[in-house]
Image (tube, rainbow, N blue to C red):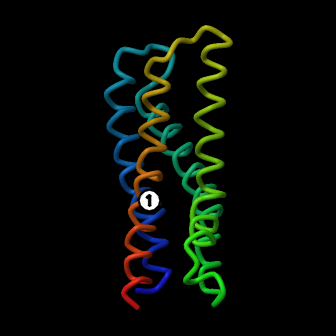
Amino acid sequence: MKLRRYYMEAVLSPSVFVLLFVVIFTIADSRGQGWQSSKSALMSAIGTSIVYFIIVCVLALSIFLNRIKGLAGNLVWNLVTWFTLPFAYLIYVVYNDIKNRILYNFGLGKGLLYLILMTSPYFIGLVWSFIKYRQSVERA
């Protein structure tokens, strides 16, 4: 398989799930909030998830470094190119959210659940696509 296919499995496919999760979560969560209409809450959530998606997609472009012949078969370099930038960003976002929630006494409520819904598909997609990539490299 080509790296483009693994990139799509790592980032683009999870983005569809993220968008679905965000829409469902926002619709369920925005009922009964008088200060913001359901439509504006939904548009804000979709906009946020699209920005998040773009950032993860750009950072995951490092997957294509595996086209370099010296890196293609090396497990360590595959791990570095596949996970370093996307995981660093995802972990940074989750860490800062939890740190700020504790610092400002927000509690670990719906906001953290929302963030987990936005990040976990990317973690799963990256790991899943890496496993499939390594299996195809070892077969070749």
**Is 132 in front, or is 139?**
139
Residue at 60% across, 58% down: 54
Compared with residue 54, is residue 100 higher up or lower down, i.e. above or below?
Answer: above
Find the residue positioned furthest to the top: 105
Compared with residue 49, is residue 135 higher up or lower down, i.e. above or below?
Answer: below
Q: Count of labels shown?
A: 1
Compared with residue 114, is residue 131 higher up or lower down, i.e. above or below?
Answer: below
Residue 26 is drawn in which quadrant?
top left
The residue identified by callout 1 is 127
Residue 53, given in percent of the width and then of the height, sits at 54, 54
Residue 60 is drawn in which quadrant?
bottom right
Compared with residue 116, is residue 128 higher up or lower down, i.e. above or below?
Answer: below
Quadrant where the C terminus lies?
bottom left
**Element carrying mark 1:** helix
Q: Assess disc 1: are there few (<14), some (14-19) or many (≥20) residues with their C-alpha within 10 Å of its C-alpha.
A: some
Residue 98, given in percent of the width and then of the height, sits at 59, 24
Quadrant where the N terminus lies?
bottom left
Residue 28, given in percent of the width and then of the height, sits at 31, 27
| Amino acid bearing label 1 | Val
**Is 47 in front, or is 116?**
116
Residue 67, given in percent of the width and then of the height, sits at 60, 86
Q: Is residue 17 left or right of residue 116?
A: left
**Is 74 in front, or is 120?**
74
Residue at 55% across, 83% down: 73
Residue at 46% across, 51% down: 123
Residue at 46% across, 42% down: 118
